[in-house]
Image (spheres, helix red, strand yellow):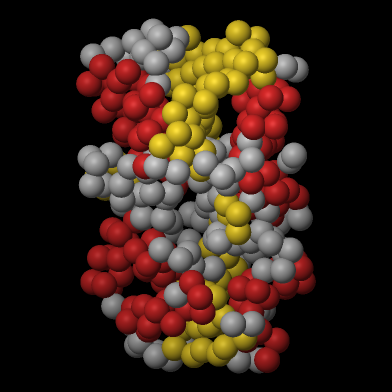
Amino acid sequence: MTAVAFSAAASDVALDALFVPFHTGAVRSPADGRVLFLRARDGFALREMAKPGWLCEQSFKPFADALERSRLAVGTPDPEERFLLVLLLPPRQRDEARALFARALTLTAPGGRVVACMPNSEGGKSGESDLAQLAGSIGSLSKHKCRVFWTLPESSTPDAALCESWLELDAPRENAAGYLSRPGLFAWDRVDIASALLAEHLPPDLAGRVADIGAGYGYLSAQVLARCAAVTSLDLFEAEARALEPARGNLQAAMRERASVIPFALHWHDVTSGLPGRYDVIVSNPPFHQGKADLPELGRAFIRAAADALERDGRFWLVANRHLPYEAILAERFQEVRQIVLQDGFKVIEARGAHR
């Protein structure tokens, strides 16, 4: 399996709807000047519209890779640069979306526009209301069960105080469990039940080079450091770049608590494309869905990546929802597979002796 499984859906209704105002003439693309597309996703609608000078920003590695495969420019804009047009596909999580609206407005040149689109089922109406709070009067339309909405050049100056306040919503903060996190990450405001179950059953004799794949904000890695004294290095692999800053802070805090420092690295990486190193231990709470869709093949791809990256006597510890069909791929790729516990709808499994 490759990163293609993580790519945006072949029929991306929000992306398609985003460009409807340009086709109807309600909004015009600037004849010159750069265009910025925040949370850009690849698709025919974008490839048809994009011109040289367009810049796409995307923090989810598989989506960023898909944009690059389509030869679109991917990167982060200079904070001082301003754009006549900023496009935006806001996320579902409202604090994260509000911070992104505020950032879009701060990057918009005087007289420029922000154009955003959200599915109705993912907060389209609330997103439209939030942009109106920041920017004043806005235009909007409905298409493909989505809301498309945009700022008007003649509208009042954006609410600077509210912009500043909403920008802070994306700053890393402590969650209810005391870990640094930020809105929109997986289980961002708590410790995920499945991850906690895996951490509870990690044996203290795990040793050597350890990788945490699909690491999120670093909870499992912090638990490895707290429970396993013989770990000598730690690599975190995570597809969402926004998770890396809080993960770094959580690892640093865990090493202070441990009273010893070991080498560690954080990698913005799509695990389904494989891992670049060899490890004695790999731990994971693999993803199995994208948006609302269950995609167990993502978890199976994580298992394959782990088997390929483990030393022959290495150990793989994972947790998964009870119903997920991972047993066949585990038996295919490992000599020994043990279910450690079945609890609260989750299973913790240890696998050893990877086949390559």
Q: Quadrant of the N terminus?
A: top right
On screen, residue 205 above or below 71? above
Write the residue at 24% across / 41% down. Answer: 177
Occupied quadrant, residue 12:
bottom right
As rendered, which of 56 and 243 lies closer to the eye? 243
In the image, is 281 to the left or to the right of 263?
A: right
Write the residue at 68% across / 91% down. Answer: 24
For the image, the number of numbered tags is 0
The percent coordinates of residue 323 (x first, y second) are 56, 45
Q: Can residue 331 be seen from the camera position used here?
A: yes
The percent coordinates of residue 37 (x first, y second) are 57, 65
The percent coordinates of residue 138 (x first, y second) are 44, 88
As rendered, which of 173 and 86 lies closer to the eye? 173
As rendered, which of 151 and 80 lies closer to the eye? 151
In the image, is 205 to the left or to the right of 67?
A: left
Q: Quadrant of the C terminus?
A: top right
Q: Can residue 30 be seen from the camera position used here?
A: no
Write the residue at 28% across / 12% down. Answer: 260
On screen, residue 353 above or below 57? above
